[in-house]
Structures are given as structure tokens and as C-alpha cells.
Amino acid sequence: MGEYEYDWFECDEELDEAQHAFVIALRARALTWAADPVDSRLVPPERDYPFVACLNIDAPQENFALLTVGVHLDGHHLRGDRLHNQDFTLPEVPTSLAMEASGSPEELAEQAAGWFEAIIRRPVVRYEWLHAGQVYASRYLFPDTREGLSQMYNRELAPPGQQDRLLAAGHFTGRGWIDTRGLGEPDRVTHVRGAS
């Protein structure tokens, strides 16, 4: 991995003193990250929403985010986890990525930076299932925990009748989307990002 030059956690909004101190310290640490490219952003507080620093972790050479993670800063307290990719809210039930910390803005920035770096350095693999020489399903996941990040199922390319069997067996998510965990072992596993 080489060094990456980014404008980490840019924001044109006015920040209060604690937020500014947090961002300055977070940016300084981010400049040392030797990680695959990610999209960072700050979301200033509005109404009842807290100050948010987040990363969209992308699938290399593809046009979508695998995962949005971030931290909510509330005074001297910080909570981090997967975030909703549009409104940047924390999940109702903390995930395996959840973290909490308390301290000064600089201490919180150090905690957040270490947490962000650990996540972006985690290996991500893509499972692929093939039929007639074409990928009909894929699943991006952390290989150490097998925690899924994103998945795709194309019924037009899938083996005939497979979708109906998967639906009948309960391998689907909301609105009838096929859950690729029901497909068994993949035909191919490819390392796509993070430490190998």
C-alpha cells in the first residue's frame, strides 16, 4: 500500500470549539493512514442530530459503498458504529463494530481515528457464485466474522428454479430480496480490500 493524499473530513460549516479541536486531531491521525481509499465526511449538527464524522467504505472498481461507519460526538462522549448511509443515524441495536468513549476532544479524536483505521484495514472478500460461466450472485463480507456487508443476486443469470427454492426455504430479506447465505459455499473468493 502506498500513501494516500486526501482532504480528510472536510466541512465548510462553522464548528464549535470542541468540534474544531476534535476535527483537527482526527485529520492529523487520518493523514497517517495507509489504507485503501475511502470517502470521508463531516455532518454538522442540526436540530436534534449530533455532530457526525463518517466514512463510506467503497468496493474498489465498483460504484457503490460497502459500508458506512461513523461516530456521533456529543460533548465529551462519542459513539461509533455502522451508520445509515443517508441520514447517518446509529442502528437501534449496536452491531459488532460498535464503540463508545469519553474524554477531551483530542482523546475522542484519537479513539475515533484508531477505530476508523481498524475498520478500513480489515480484510474484505467477495464471494461469487457462478452459473454458465457468469456471476449470478455475490456477497461482500469480513472473512474473519463472515459478517455480510453487501450482496447481489441476479435471477436471470441464476440456475433455473433456484430463486423459488431459496424463497421457499426462507432465504430472503425484506421485499423478497434473496439472501445469498442460502447459496452454500461460493465458487470463487476474491480479496477486494484491506489487509490481506
Image: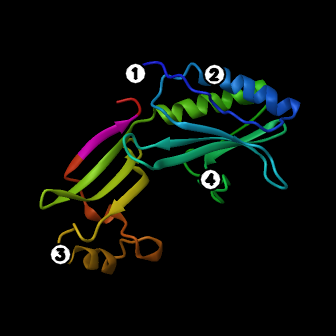
Nearer the camera: disc 3 or disc 4? 3
**Labels 4 and 1: the sequence-earlier one:** 1
Residue that label 3 marks: 160
**Labels 3 and 2: the sequence-earlier one:** 2
Badge 4: residue crowd in 10 Å (few <14, some 14–19, many ≥20): few
Regarding residue 104, the answer to whether it shows in the image is no
Residue that label 2 marks: 29
Disc 1, SS:
loop
Residue depicted at 50% across the width and 22% down the height: 4
Do tag 1 and tag 2 residues touch (Cβ < 8 Å)?
A: no
Residue depicted at 29% across the width and 50% down the height: 127
Residue that label 4 marks: 94
Question: How many numbered circles does the render carry?
Answer: 4
Residue that label 1 marks: 1
Q: Which residues are magenta?
A: 189-193
Residue 67 on image: x %, y %: 51, 48
